[in-house]
């Protein structure tokens, strides 16, 4: 419901003829992250995170531990973050965009000017607001 409302708000404030562009991680990619551990390190930062995917809720959670070097004290400070990403199908998102009023919806594969293929990791969406729509209206 929140995503549908977001699309409606984007549509409302987009100028007539305007284009809404966004990309998603595919459900396949998010499922594939389940149980994976990642690490990123620089001289003054260290980040390690673990991903968990729930089939029931279709949510991928990223549990992050962040360590930053405090230059003044020379000590490492630890922080934690939790990020969540819900998996949506192309059909669901296209339907949400149509319900919000968007026309001429196009879907592209991962950085390719072609339709997505099975196994894509990322999908790009382009949706246009009708040129004849009223400003801040349909």
Image (cartoon, rainbow, N blue to C red):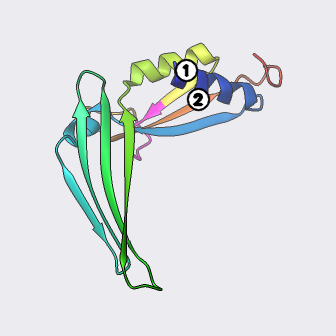
Where does the magenta region start and end? 107-114
- Is 95 rendered above or below residue 12? above
Q: Find residue 134 and report its image quarter.
A: top right
Mark 1 Cα shell of 10 Å, populated few (<14), some (14-19), many (≥20): some
Regarding residue 119, the answer to whether it shows in the image is no
Q: Which residue corresponds to the image point at 32% horizontal and 54% vertical from the top-left?
A: 64
Residue occupying the far left of the picture = 35
Q: Where residue 4 appears, x then y in whole percent? A: 55, 20
Q: Where residue 62 appears, x then y in whole percent? A: 31, 46
Mark 2 Cα shell of 10 Å, populated few (<14), some (14-19), many (≥20): many
Residues under labels 1 and 2: Cα distance? Answer: 14 Å
Q: Which residue is mark 1?
A: 4
Viewer-proximal residue among 15 and 57 = 57
Q: Find residue 51 and report its image quarter.
A: top left
N-terminal label among 1 and 2: 1
Q: Which residue corresponds to the image point at 47% horizontal and 86% vertical from the top-left?
A: 72
Viewer-proximal residue among 111 and 32 = 32
Q: Where residue 48 appears, x then y in whole percent? A: 27, 60
| Number of residue marks | 2
> Mark 2 falls on what kind of element?
strand
Q: Find residue 8 and report its image quarter.
A: top right
Can you say which quadrant of the picture contains the C terminus?
A: top right
> Mark 1 falls on what kind of element?
helix
The chief SS type of the magenta part is loop
Q: Which residue is mark 2?
A: 127
Q: Which residue corresponds to the image point at 20% horizontal and 40% vertical from the top-left?
A: 32
Q: Is residue 79 left or right of residue 36?
A: right
Q: Which residue corresponds to the image point at 49% horizontal and 16% vertical from the top-left?
A: 95
Residue occupying the far right of the picture = 135
- Is 62 rendered above or below residue 55? below
Q: Is residue 76 left or right of residue 15?
A: left
């Amino acid at each position: 419901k929140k995503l549908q409302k977001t699309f409606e708000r984007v549509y409302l404030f987009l100028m007539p003829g305007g284009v809404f562009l966004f990309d998603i991680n595919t459900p396949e990619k998010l499922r594939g992250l389940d149980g994976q551990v990642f690490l990123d390190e620089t001289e003054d930062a260290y980040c390690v995170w673990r991903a968990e995917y729930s089939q029931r809720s279709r949510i991928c959670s990223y549990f992050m531990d962040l360590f930053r070097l405090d230059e003044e004290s020379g000590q490492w400070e630890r922080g934690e973050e939790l990020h969540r990403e819900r998996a949506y199908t192309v059909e669901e998102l296209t339907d949400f965009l149509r319900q919000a009023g968007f026309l001429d919806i196009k879907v592209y594969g991962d950085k390719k000017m072609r339709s997505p293929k099975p196994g894509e990791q990322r999908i790009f969406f382009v949706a246009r607001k009708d040129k004849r729509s009223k400003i801040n209206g349909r």
